[in-house]
Amino acid sequence: MGERFQEQPSNKSATLEMALRRAQKKRLQKKEYQVMTDIVLLQVAAENYTLEPEDPFQAWFQAMESLSEAESYTLSCQLEPRS
């Protein structure tokens, strides 16, 4: 009672499949770590920048007409049709 039994593979193909899954998990963890490291490095680099909008851009941007939700969706579907 209370003992846990780990299922053991009964043949070589099951053993290989388990090894493959472990290797894929390790690769995924390594990739996730690399992505997180890259994000942190980009955030640190971004702290060195101060961006101020220029007056002509700010005037142009504020003069832009906002789209409704429906208009935005329609335009999105035209640019990237559903597959």
Image: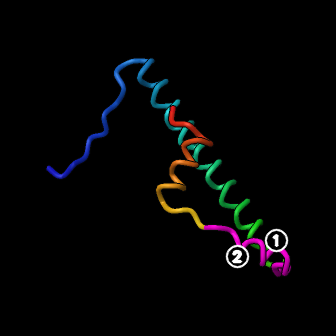
Mark 1 = which residue?
A: 45
Q: Residue at x 78, y 78 (%)?
A: 59
Colour pattern = rainbow
Whether residue 48 is visible to the viewer of this picture, yes or no, is no
Residue 62 is marked as: 2
Residue 6 in sight here: yes
Magenta stretch, main secondary structure, is helix
Amino acid type of the residue tagged 1 in the rendering = Ala
Residue 70 % position (x, y): 47, 55
> Crowdedness of circle 1 by 10 Å Cα count: few (<14), some, many (20+)?
few
Q: Neighbour class for label 2 at 10 Å: few (<14), some, many (≥20)?
A: few
Whether residues under marks 2 and 1 lie with C-beta atoms below 8 angstroms apart, the answer is no
The first of marks 2 and 1 along the sequence is 1
Which residue is depicted at the point 64% across and 55% down? 33
What separation in Å lies between label 2 and label 1 (alpha carbons)?
Answer: 29 Å
Q: Which one is in front, 40 or 30?
A: 40
Q: Residue 50, position in %: x, y?
A: 83, 81
Judging depth in this view, the residue of 35 and 17 nearest the camera is 35
Mark 2 vs mark 1, foreground winner is: 2
In the picture, measured across the screen, residue 78 lies left or right of residue 55, that is left
In depth, the one of 55 and 18 nearer the eye is 55
* Residue found at x 34% / y 30%: 8
56 part of magenta stretch: yes
* Mark 1 element type: helix
Magenta residues, start to end: 51-65
Whole-percent x, y for residue 15 in the image: 45, 25
